[in-house]
Amino acid sequence: MWKYYAFRFSGATIAYLPRKLGYLTARFTAFMVYMLSPKTREAVADNMKRVLGPEADEVSLKPAVRDVLRNAAKNYYDLIRLPHMKLKDIERLLTVHGWHNFEVALSKGKGVILVTAHLGSFDLAAQVFPSHSVKVTGLVEPLEPEVLLKHVVALRNSHGMNFMPVQFGVLKVVMRSLRSGEVVLIACDRDFGNDSMKLDFFGERTAMPAGAVRIAMKTGAALVPVFNLRQKDGLYDVYFEPEVEVLPEGDGAVANNMNRVIAVMKNILRFILSSGWY
């Protein structure tokens, strides 16, 4: 329950800070987490080792871990501030690349499944769709307690998005949306729907959620990767990748399709690390 009260308190205080001061507060919070929570620090370092490779040492890991924590803290600030921002002001923060890839997929009329990862500012970048008057249903992690879940979903939906927790009955909503030629947004880097497959991810067998791929195979919806990256100046780049070709059936089709999505995710992560954006 403390998380809910923390959100409410932050929304009544920090959310009203000017953006630069809000990000400065987020950086300080991330620093305190880094210093006072060794468990969190070690968990992030373990994940970064997978991406950086086994040769990564403490010298390279420390700044990467600090950057990840800073980005996460800024994301929370973006989320609580979202209802207080105007859509036109959000648009000024976003530079969109590859929008034509999305338009081509949408024009096929079978719906589009956007697959993404928790990079950059997930909630802020998602507002690119309301700004283009595109109806999107996004699936998010169910949170406890229920009052916290409702509050976070309300923040995310404050500008016209339709985020829904992965709970009983959500699949029917997703299928209905796709059959109507609409758009569904699913994060494929975190398994909270118990529909994962063990696949190779940077040299390790990792549980990766396969729901998006299975739905695309069943409905014929286009599968389009989309990612956003936070630049150092506080602006954001949103990238729509070309549609991933989906094998409709056959031995190992789900795994093969998942590997195609993972290949795109790996390229994006390598690009992030090479550019220093988080």
Image (cartoon, grey):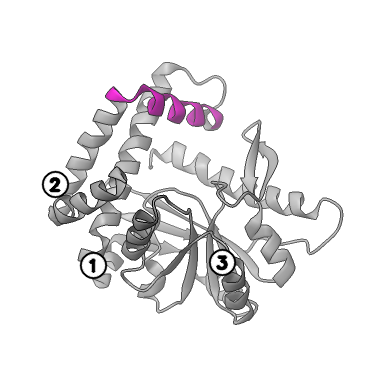
Instruction: Please state which of the two labelled residues, at mark 2 or mark 1, is closer to the viewer.
Output: 2
Q: Residue at x 42, y 22 (%)?
A: 60
For the C terminus, the image quarter is top left
Are the two marked residues, 2 and 1, in contact with CB atoms closer than 8 angstroms?
A: no
Type of amino acid under label 3: Val
Relative placement, left or right, of 263 versus 35 is: right
Residue 23 position within the rendered picture, expressed as x and y whole percent measured from the top left: 21, 45
Q: Residue at x 39, y 49 (%)?
A: 120
Mark 3: which secondary structure? helix
Residue 169 position within the rendered picture, expressed as x and y whole percent measured from the top left: 58, 67
Q: How many marks?
A: 3
Residue 261 position within the rendered picture, expressed as x and y whole percent measured from the top left: 64, 52
Instruction: Mark 3: give few (<14), some (14-19) or many (20+) Cα within 10 Å.
Output: few
> Which residues are the magenta region?
35-50
Residue underneath mark 1? 89
Mark 1: which secondary structure? helix
Of mark 2 and mark 1, the one earlier in the sequence is 2
Type of amino acid under label 1: Asp
Of mark 3 and mark 2, the one earlier in the sequence is 2
Query: Considering depth in this image, is 141 or 69 the residue closer to the camera?
Result: 141
Q: Is residue 46 magenta?
A: yes
Query: Considering depth in this image, is 119 or 4 the residue closer to the camera?
Result: 4
- Whether residue 98 is visible here, answered yes or no, is no
Residue underneath mark 3? 170
Q: Residue at x 26, y 56 (%)?
A: 80
Instruction: Please state which of the two labelled residues, at mark 3 or mark 2, is closer to the viewer.
Output: 3
Are the two marked residues, 3 and 2, in contact with CB atoms closer than 8 angstroms?
A: no
Query: Considering depth in this image, is 252 or 6 the residue closer to the camera?
Result: 6
Residue 244 position within the rendered picture, expressed as x and y whole percent measured from the top left: 66, 60
Query: Considering depth in this image, is 106 or 75 the residue closer to the camera?
Result: 75
Residue underneath mark 2? 21
